[in-house]
Image (cartoon, helix red, strand yellow):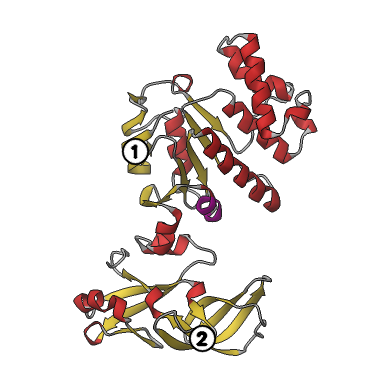
Amino acid sequence: MAGVTLKGVQKRFDKTVVIKDLDLEVKEHEFMVLVGPSGCGKSTALRMIAGLEEISGGTITIGDRVVNDLPPKDRDIAMVFQSYALYPHMTVRQNLEFGLKIRKMPRAEIDKLVNNTAQMLGIDHFLDRKPRELSGGQRQRVAVGRAIVRQPAVFLFDEPLSNLDAKLRVQMRAEIAKLQHRLQTTTIYVTHDQVEAMTMGQRVAVLKDGDLKQVGTPMELYDKPANVFVASFIGTPPMNLFAATITEGGATLTTAKFTFPVPASLRSMTAKHDGLKVVVGIRPENILETGVEGRGETAPIEAEVEIAEPLGNEVIVHARAGDALLVAKLEPHRVPKLGEKLSLFVELDSLHLFDAETERRLE
């Protein structure tokens, strides 16, 4: 097994900069997820680690070797693609053993590795089928199996579940996470789906426009987003964000239509930034329909319902408070009607504050 380190890694296509000085350390045995919107550079970063794209600057180290100039076959990695990339004319068994044959491994060892891997993934009963005879989920298991059977130092996954339906994606992401925990192979997993990132990764790296915005555990990203982008990207539904100004010596947050008192837990910080323009963030689950004791200070806010989405265990309400749109997760005891006026309460101790100019979190 081996860790992966990127130092000052850059990627340019002519004058277009795709990756800007990327510094990232993936620890040995770790499951690291790279997440971000389309075009953020996450798949390009993965392909540079794999050796499928040349880097324009910096160094990539796998284990104790700098691999900048090594071809993919010498990097001791195995990659699973979005498209499965199975050989259509070969059976499942032949697909699994193909890489081992190229390495001229003894027949008995090939059979042992293929059979063990097939049993682990539950594909042992269709080893003689060809890919066209398999479902999407079965093909994905074969693609994963082809990576596992090689026993590499590092697994690389490039959006492997995006072709599957919603139910199968949930099942497969659980299976991949359990498999990595069992094998303890260093894994780098790329996805645009932040739910996938949060549920699978031991740590998550959030990218935007080739910049690394934050690295941390899923709960670190959720509870303490380092900037406005991470705050808005991580979480479903996304965090509510409002423009405001810190006023009255740090005692209040004033927006165009309403004012929040600053809770005691944040007062020492806001007192240093009186007059500063900020972005105020509040998670949908921290907006309540009734005041709840034991959840700290709250502030009332009046809102008019625009959309209500009943999900069984909760109701997602999109409402308008003055000129501001907000989303709240409410209890499922009833579904508010379109146009209904709601008296809501904001949990003030759960506010997130960001400098409006730098978009960085205020600490």
- Prevailing SS of the magenta stretch: helix
**Going by the image, does 167 lie left or right of 48?**
right
Query: Closer to us: mark 1 or mark 2?
Result: 2
- For the point 65% across and 74% down, the residue is 309
Picture quarter with the N terminus: top left
In percent of width and height, residue 194 lies at 52, 55
Q: Which residue is mark 2?
A: 344
What range is drawn magenta here? 194-199
Considering the numbered disc 2 on the image, is that residue within a helix, a strand or a loop?
strand
* 195 part of magenta stretch: yes
Res 175 → quadrant? top right
* 105 part of magenta stretch: no
Picture quarter with the C terminus: bottom left
CA gap, disc 1 and disc 2: 47 Å
**Going by the image, does 210 lie left or right of 129?**
left
* Above-or-below relation of 6 to 202: above
Considering the numbered disc 1 on the image, is that residue within a helix, a strand or a loop?
strand
- For the point 34% across and 79% down, the residue is 244
